[in-house]
Amino acid sequence: MKNCPCGTGRIYSECCEPYITGKAKAPTAEALMRSRYSAYAEHAIDYIVNTCIRREKDNDIDHKSTRDWSERSNWLGLKIISTEKGGLADKEGTVEFEAVYERNGLKDVHHEKAKFKRDSVTSGDETAGVGEWLYDEGDVIPHTMVRSSPKTGRNDPCSCGSGKKYKFCCGR
């Protein structure tokens, strides 16, 4: 049994997995945010796509680039900074978060204020109930990437194993 990637400390099968597999719906905007992070860590791209609001202009989410980001990244952790609304009785909510990951030797933080909306389940003109939470849009907050290992110096041995100095080998 493994811990959930979303950082709650709970077991994955009792935390985000039921949302990702469709056995349950996320009850809050934060629960959806956490499950979407876990979906990136678990490479569940269909869940990420299916939990987004679809619009005419951007109906096609780029599956390939989303899958590449998911699979080529080592997901290191999720930090929820703040939540605004997004509870059981709300129809909208905002979750500010930082998703830390490493890719190509660089550690990065995806910092975003994500907006979520709950779709309505309708029956005729009456609202029959409250539907599921969906990711609407987000404001990405720029962050500086940091190397996860020291940079190779010009006079250091080349990392390719040639025995030459980096500046005379791959550093040209």
Image (cartoon, grey):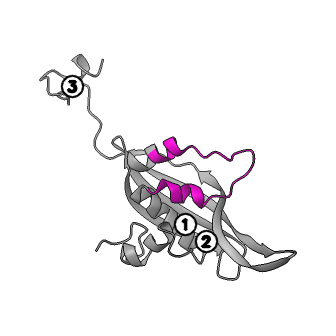
Label 1–label 2 contact, CB within 8 A? yes
Label 2–label 3 contact, CB within 8 A? no
Label 1–label 3 contact, CB within 8 A? no
What residue is drawn where x is 28% and y is 41%? 150
Is 5 contained in the magenta span?
A: no
Name the disc covering residue 155, or none: 3
Residue 86 in view of the camera: yes
Name the disc covering residue 10, or none: none
| Magenta stretch, residue numbers | 44-67
The residue carrying mark 2 is: 29
Classed neighbour count for the residue bearing mark 2: other residues with Cα under 10 Å, few (<14), some (14–19), many (≥20): many
The residue carrying mark 1 is: 33
Going from the N terminus, do you reach mark 1 or mark 3 first?
Answer: 1
**Separation of marks 1 and 3 at Cα, in angstroms:** 45 Å
Image height check: is 155 above or below 125?
Answer: above
Residue type (three-letter) at the residue carrying disc 3: Asn
Residue type (three-letter) at the residue carrying disc 1: Met
What residue is drawn where x is 38% and y is 73%? 12
Q: Secondary structure at mark 3?
A: loop
